[in-house]
Amino acid sequence: MSVADAGGGTRRLVVGPFNRVEGDLEVRLDIAGGEVLAAFVTSPLFRGFERILEGRDPRDALVIAPRICGICSVSQSHAAALALAGVQGVAPTANGRVATNLLVATENVADHLTHFHVFFMPDFARAIYAGQPWFARAETRFKAAQGTSVRAALATRTTLLHVLGLLAGRWPHTLAIQPGGVTRGADARDKMRLLATLGATRQELEERLFGAPLARIAALAAPEELDALRRGESDLALFLAIAEDLDLASLGRAYDRYLSYGAYPDEDGRLYARGIVTSEGRGALDTDAIAEDHTNARMEGRWRAHHPFEGFTFPDATDETGYSWCKAPRLAGLPFETGAVARQMVDGQPLIRALVASGGGSVFVRVLARLIETARTLLAMEDWVRRLEPGAPWCAQGEMPREGRAAGLTEAARGALGHWLRVEDGRIAGYQIIAPTTWNFSPRDAAGVPGPLEAALVGAPVRQGETTPVAVQHIVRSFDPCMVCTVH
Amino acid sequence: MDGFNVLWIQSGGCGGCTMSLLCAEAPDLAATLGSAGIRFIWHPTLSEETGTEALALFEAVLSGELRLDALCVEGAMLRGPNNTGRFHLLAGTGVPTIDWVRRLAALAKNVVAVGTCAAYGGVTAAGPNPADACGLQYDGRRVGGALGAAFRSRSGLPVINIAGCPTHPNWITETLMLLAAGLLGADDLDVYNRPRSYADQLVHHGCPRNEYYEYKASAEKLSDLGCMMEHLGCVGTQAHADCNTRLWNGEGSCTRGGYACINCTAPEFEEPGHAFLETPKIAGIPVGLPTDMPKAWFVALSSLAKAATPDRLRRNATSDHVVAPPAVRDLKRR
């Protein structure tokens, strides 16, 4: 952290290490008149996974890519499997598709629980809020690492992750997801065990987090329906009280432009639709219009933006103009926000649509979208378990051609994740990855347009004497950033 | 001051060892550590303190105001580009994380590498090693790394390498508990300085595919039930860890999940020299032999076992579900 006088009554704050996000993060803030004038987001860690993948046997991507990230590991694995499936021209068996959905959904729901209880809510148990009427409850439940709800949620998450122990060997870093399905089938006994695990998870969440049945949360449509949920002792009721008191619905608005690759494919369609939402409404996603800009990324190749099939990753060791290792992905030249709020906007979840329409995407809406999605996804998971068919095939076998290219597009908890794979002469010739937080926490592009977080931070209030402004922390964490994925 | 103070720093890794640690159960992480008097001075995932508050804690350790019983480092140390460490400057400080680790390690009673990246470099050091990654005291299999071969923490121990990609939650909690209790000495570490408490076992121990292994009834494709050593790259007979006797996330392990053990607790596991899920062979015989097994005996026993494979195992080995259950014998009528 450092404070400097930037002249003209503007002071500059450098905030870091920014914890309770996955990985390391630094945010530079220009502050005047008690609010943020401009923000610059730095992803400080570069490992070079895209380069590590080049030259390998394409199938090795299933070992290497998940290790980009310990919290999005299954999503990374899924994106790699989809890219390989595209090159092989193979599709998963019905069992393989349903089981893969279960594995990806387990990680995504577990991550939503981790985000709400371990990463986001503990900031309301900070001493700075000691005077607020809800503080005693927030402190008891959400004091970092110790709060009763923090510990209960970690226990629930641990229970839920037994789905991955049973079907995928372990979490993180499984090899169970393959281009043609999964490596381990389920028999009738396994299905009962999975239903017991999901049932226990559902009960915990209905009692402690929601104070309501999952189906009611999943079906929320009008903002007034939240009023009934404010009563009672649930963690959701506490969040709603805090959000109202601190006006979190007015905090952290970005561009209200949303991107989702769509999640959980079925025989026909997906549980959550693919597409974009802009000021012009819902639209189709054109992946050919995706390009990464290197202007502020300390990467060679600044002369133009690159579609990921043409992209490359050569860090510029001597560069002094870039301020992040993160490239700036743009869709048709524009920054897009991704995550649960984007998925629910694109899918048309009525309450999230209504809230964004009336007040814009905010800290409040991002967190609420995650909670609603948790309920929706868990309900679908119970259905998927019932549809697993013991005795039917789990994994189709494909042949790896010497040449080919394909994109693997999936949704991690924190948003749209894409792998663009090129195979030449039987080896990986190119492997470009755009992770959710690459979109959300991108630096400025060649036109000087800030990334979504950089835009969302403008106007954030900074109190007298604050060196790590708490409002900035709420906004940053509302995106559920994964910094190890961001640069990879 | 009583208790055992742990400071946790992450660098060139994925955070997966922490994510796994949070899966500790029966008892959970807080209860396990609490019962042993272990407390995190700061942990990137769990602590309230961020920015200036976190840096104040680091400074308190450096000034000697806070005793540091164990420095836990997760993720590889990044030396690049050109030995500047710029591929990871610790946010808010402008100082390479590798330098923070060196300063803190000099004061720590014990230094613990959490995961294969921190221990040896791991996947972050794979391929062309773009970030010039290494482990705390190893660079792959070679002693050295960020702290150097001669490094000893104040307890006199080298860096304790809790290798694994990721680590099992109990490997971490039990190692910290042993340290807090003063029960971990140099003899309790193996040749790669891994705690012998889990590294003196093989992944093969307790593998439910052992009957297939005995008869060399092999899986031929992913999702088959047979032994994965002959065709699918499994090195569980050589890999040091207790994954099949101490299960993961309830009842899991890699081989139980239907895929090969890739020896992720070993230095340089990231570069096996062949595709991970394919067994290299010479004249049809797998190159890697089971640990402590003379080659001639392995070949002889394998051909005998193959000849004796029961039909049940032969059929099940190449199926994705049991097609032939074991016969029920009347044990009274031998």
Image: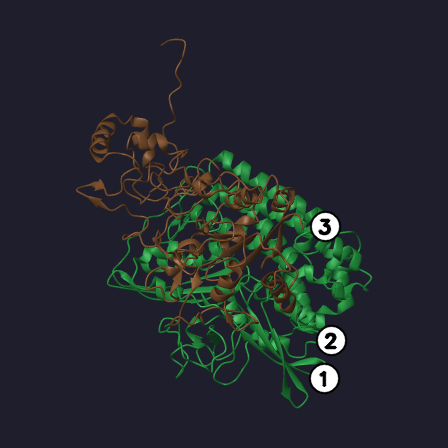
Residues packed near mark 2 inside 10 Å, few (<14), some (14 to 19) or many (20 plus)? some
- Describe the element under mark 1 as helix, strand or loop: loop
Observer-side mark, 1 or 3, equals 1
Question: Subunit of mark 2?
Answer: A
Same subunit: marks 1 and 3: yes
Observer able to see residue A247: yes
Q: Position of residue A457 (x, y in %)?
A: 63, 76
Question: Subunit of mark 3?
Answer: A
Q: Which residue is mark 2?
A: A463
Q: Toward the viewer: B62 or A394?
A: B62
Q: Amino acid at mark 1?
A: Gly
Q: CA distance from mark 3 to mark 2?
A: 37 Å
Q: Which chain is brown?
A: B
- Give the residue displayed 36% in from the left and 37% down from the top: B225
- Describe the element under mark 3 as helix, strand or loop: loop
Question: Subunit of mark 1?
Answer: A
Q: Amino acid at mark 2?
A: Arg
Image mark for residue A212: 3
Q: Which chain is green?
A: A
Q: Amino acid at mark 3?
A: Ala
